[in-house]
Amino acid sequence: MTDDLDPIIHPAHRLRICALLAAGTTVELAIVKEHCGLSASALSKQVSALVDAGYVDQQRSRTDSRRIWLSLTHEGKTAYRRHVHALRALLADSEASI
């Protein structure tokens, strides 16, 4: 089951970003930044990895180009669900062996 752990999503900040977006809503980058407690440059690096993987879509506001909105793509939702399922299975296996 650990084969289903996604190396793109697995780093803690990226996992947190995906979890925030998993509700199916579009979230402004400033909210994600505040939620994750990252600097702008660190957040940009994490979001870029998710965008490059095709997991996150980012759209600039039409009225203010400084405002960016993020959402999970269909592929991102699928990868996130698979990753969470693999994490839960890993935890269940470790609890069973205790």
Image (cartoon, rainbow, N blue to C red):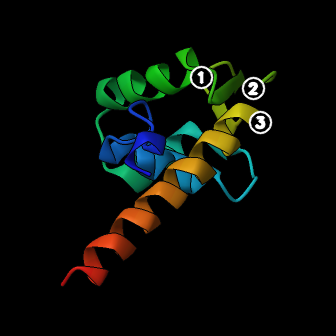
* Dot 3 and dot 2 residues touching (CB under 8 Å): no
Q: Earlier in the sequence, mark 3 or mark 2?
A: 2
Q: CA distance from mark 3 to mark 2?
A: 21 Å
> x, y (%) of residue 7?
38, 32
Q: Position of residue 27 (x, y in %)?
A: 65, 46
- Tell me if label 1 and label 2 are in contact, CB under 8 Å: yes
Kind of residue sitting beneath label 3: His
Relative placement, left or right, of 22 versus 85 is right
Residue 61's mark?
Answer: 2
Q: Nearer the viewer, residue 29 or 91?
A: 91
Q: The residue under label 2 is which amino acid type?
A: Ser
Quadrant in the rendering for residue 11: top left
Please indicate whether residue 98 sits to the left or right of residue 68 in the image: left
Q: Earlier in the sequence, mark 3 or mark 1?
A: 1
For marks 1 and 2, the one nearer the N-term is 2
Residue hosting label 3: 74
Task: Please provide percent x and percent y for residue 89.
Answer: 44, 66
Q: Residue at x 31, y 50 (%)?
A: 37
Residue pointed to by mark 1: 66
**In the drawing, does residue 37 fall left or right of residue 8?**
left
C-alpha gap between disc 3 and disc 1: 25 Å
92 shown above or below 20? below
For mark 1, give the secondary structure.
Answer: loop
Which amino acid, mark 1? Answer: Arg
Q: Quadrant of residue 70?
A: top right
Q: What residue is shown at x 79% (from left), y 24% (from top)?
A: 63
